[in-house]
Image (cartoon, coloured by chain):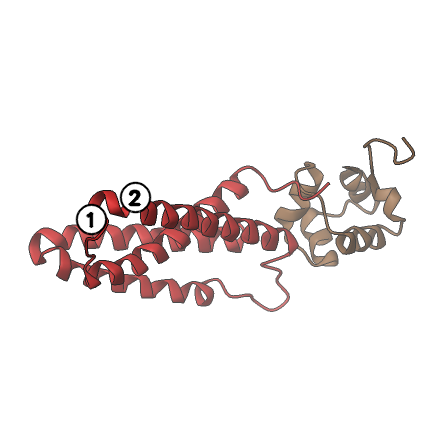
Chain colours: A red, B brown
Amino acid sequence: MASAQKQAVFNLTIIVLTVITVFALAPVLGFQRAQGGLGLLGFLGFGPFLFRKRPGEVLYDERDFVIQVRAWVAAYSIFWVAFVAVCVLAPFTFGSSGFVRVELVQMSVWYGFMMVWGISAVITLIQYAQGGIRGAE
Amino acid sequence: LKNHIRRLRFENGELTQQNLADRVGVTRQTIIALEAGKYTPSLVLAFRLARAFGVGVEGVFQYDGESAEG
């Protein structure tokens, strides 16, 4: 398994655990307080330390780079489409002169972050599962 | 883009995929993907591979697309 692949699995695991934690805490603490579980996302920062390079070892090369670039571009593109869709559809939920709670705006940042990292990890894994990428021929 | 990496590995003292990967500075997974025709390398990597086998780039890779002269 390639290093970038291991890191994608790690990131996806952290994201899934975070979502499970938030939804498990919600009935106990209430949905608002359960958002504290989002702090688990901080473990994403440990990824680069867990998959460090040993001397003389190649862990990451041009193919991994291309796979990662495609995964991030796809993740941000999907996020952008979802963001525009939410903005366009918001009046149908909140009314054209309605209000959105500040908490909701703050939460959306974290869920957007999870969405981008999660999609990027999934697309990375899909590309590796397909055996690689064809590149520009 | 076809390549002769697998054949060249065996003609060069039965080089393992890992040995070749170490020589050209990529991961073994990339050599596997190249041999399976699932990855098209950059020009730099193509030259490194050719140099590792002591042949020209056209000795390793073969372009089967339409002729530019059409």
Q: Amino acid at mark 2?
A: Leu
Q: Is B14 placed left or right of A86 in the picture?
A: right
Q: Is A68 placed left or right of B68 in the picture?
A: left
Q: Is A44 placed left or right of B19 in the picture?
A: left
Mark 1 and mark 2: Cα distance apart in space: 9 Å
Residue B22 pos. (x, y %): 70, 57
- Chain of the residue on which disc 2 is drawn: A
Residue at the spot x=53%, y=42% of the render?
Answer: A127
Which of pointers 1 and 2 lies earlier in the amino acid sequence? 2
- Considering only vertical position in the picture, is A134 above or below B70? below
Q: Between A74 and B15, which is closer to the camera in this rendering?
A: A74
Mark 2 sits on what residue?
A: A89
Using a 10 Å C-alpha cutoff, classify the residue at mark 2 as few (fewer than 14 neighbours), some (14 to 19) or many (20 or more).
few
Q: Is B66 placed left or right of A51 in the picture?
A: right
Asked if labels 1 and 2 share a chain, the reply is yes
Residue at the spot x=55%, y=37% of the render?
Answer: A130
Q: Between A126 and A70, which is closer to the camera in this rendering?
A: A70
Residue A70 pos. (x, y %): 55, 49
Residue farthest left in this picture: A28
Residue B28 pos. (x, y %): 64, 50
- What SS does tag 1 mark? helix
Residue farthest right in this picture: B69
Residue at the spot x=70%, y=37% of the render?
Answer: B37
Mark 1 sits on what residue?
A: A94
* Quarter of the image where the C terminus of chain A is located: top right
Q: Between A15 and A88, which is closer to the camera in this rendering?
A: A88
- What SS does tag 2 mark? helix
Using a 10 Å C-alpha cutoff, classify the residue at mark 1 as few (fewer than 14 neighbours), some (14 to 19) or many (20 or more).
few
Residue at the spot x=27%, y=53% of the render?
Answer: A17
